[in-house]
Image: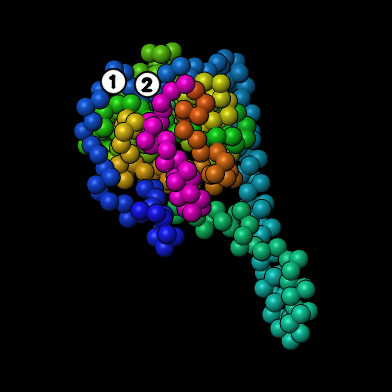
Amino acid sequence: MAYNGKHRRFNPFEDGVSRREMVVGSSLVVAGVALGTAGAMGTQTGQAASRNAAATSAAGGSRGREEQRKTAEAAPRAAESERASRGESRQPLREQRKKEEPEPRPEKSRPARRAKKASAVPIILSTGEWKARKPERKATVRSGPPKFIVIHHTTTDNVDDFSLSRAKWLARAIQNAHLKQGWGDTGQQFTISRGGHILEGRAGSLDAVRAGDMVVGTHVAGLNDFAVGIECEGMYSNVLPPRELRASLVRMCAWLCREYDLNPHKVIVPHRKFNPTDCCGRKFARTIPQLRRAVAKAL
Ligand SMILES: [Zn+2]
C-alpha cells in the first residue's frame, strides 16, 4: 500500500513495538563470541597507554572544573534575564523584544540540557560489577569525543534468556574470547544483552565517557582511535534485536551523544560501513536510520 502521509512512520526503536517483532531461538550457533569484531585489531603500546591515561586523568579534572564554571555562569544569566523581563514589562512591546533578543537563552544551554536529562542516564554495569578479569594491557585513553558510534552484533545465539546473570556471563565470555585473541581486554567499549542490560566492555570506558574522552578499543579495523563500539548480543542478519535491546540501545546512544555533544544522524553507523563484514547483521543494519531518529528524539 502506498504511503499516504497520514500514518506515522513505523520506527522499531520507538515505543509501541509489537512483541511479534521479537524473534528468539535462532539456530545459528557460531563458535567463539563476538565474532563481529574479528579482524578489528588495533595497535597500542603500554607506553602510549600510560601516557594517555595520565593525560586523561588531568583532562578529567579540568573538564569537571569547566562544567562547574559553565553552570555558575548560566545561573546569573538566567536571573538577569528574569529581572530584565520583569523590568521591561512597563515598556512598549517592541522595546522589550529588542532588549530580550541578544540575551542568551539559559534553558537551551548545554549544562541545563544535561541537567534536565540527568534522569535519562542509563544504568551501565561497570567491569567491576560483572567481575571482569584484570586487563592484560592498560587501556589507551584518547582525549576528546569519538567521531563514530559503531553498532555491532555478537553473532551469538538469539537466546531468550533476558536475565542480568546471562548479561554478566556474556560480558565475561566476550572478555575471555578477546583476551585469547591478544586484544589485551574486551574489544568493544560497551555491550548490550538481549534483555537490554548495558555493560561496560573495555575497562575504563565508563570513566572516559564521563570525562568527555574515549578509551581506544579493538572493534573496527582502521578506526579504533575514533570510534566507540557497542556490541549487541545476538545475530541480526534476518531478524531485529528484541525490543528490550533496542530500547537500551536508544538510551545508550542518546547518553553518548549528550556526553560527547554529537549529532546522532552523523555518528551512528553499522560496523559493515567500514569493514568487509555483515555486522551488525543485514536486517538490523537497515534500521540504523530509524535508530538515529529515535536517538535524536530522545536527546
Ligand atoms: Zn562488528
Say if 94 sits above or below 193 in the image: below
Q: Position of residue 218 (x, y in %)?
A: 48, 22
Give 155 or 80, whichever is nearer the viewer.
155
Say if 269 sits above or below 28 in the image: below
Question: Disc 2, ligand 1: is the CB inside 8 Å?
Answer: no
Q: What is the number of the mark on residue 296?
A: none
User: Label 1 amino acid?
Assistant: Val
Q: Position of residue 123 (x, y in %)?
A: 39, 44
Q: Secondary structure at mark 2?
A: helix
The span picked out in magenta is: 276-299
User: Main SS of the magenta segment?
Assistant: helix
Say if 168 sits above or below 218 in the image: below
Task: Kindly indicate the quadrant of the structure image that contains residue 46.
Answer: top right
Residue furthest to the front in view is 2
Say if 232 sits above or below 275 in the image: below
Left or right side of 218 for 92 = right
Q: Where does label 2 land, which residue? A: 35
Q: Residue at x 38, y 36 (%)?
A: 284
Task: Kindly indicate the quadrant of the structure image that contains residue 291.
Answer: top left
Q: Residue at x 66, y 57 (%)?
A: 72
Q: Earlier in the sequence, mark 1 or mark 2?
A: 1
Is disc 2 surrounded by few (<14), some (14 to 19) or many (20+) residues within 10 Å? many
Q: Is residue 294 magenta?
A: yes
Q: Position of residue 171 (x, y in %)?
A: 34, 28
Give 89 or 203, whichever is nearer the viewer.
89
Marks 1 and 2 close (CB-CB < 8 Å): yes
User: Label 2 amino acid?
Assistant: Leu
Ligand 1 shown in quarter: top left
Q: CA distance from mark 1 to mark 2?
A: 8 Å
Q: Residue at x 76, y 85 (%)?
A: 92
Q: Residue at x 34, y 31 (%)?
A: 237
Q: Where does label 1 land, which residue? A: 30
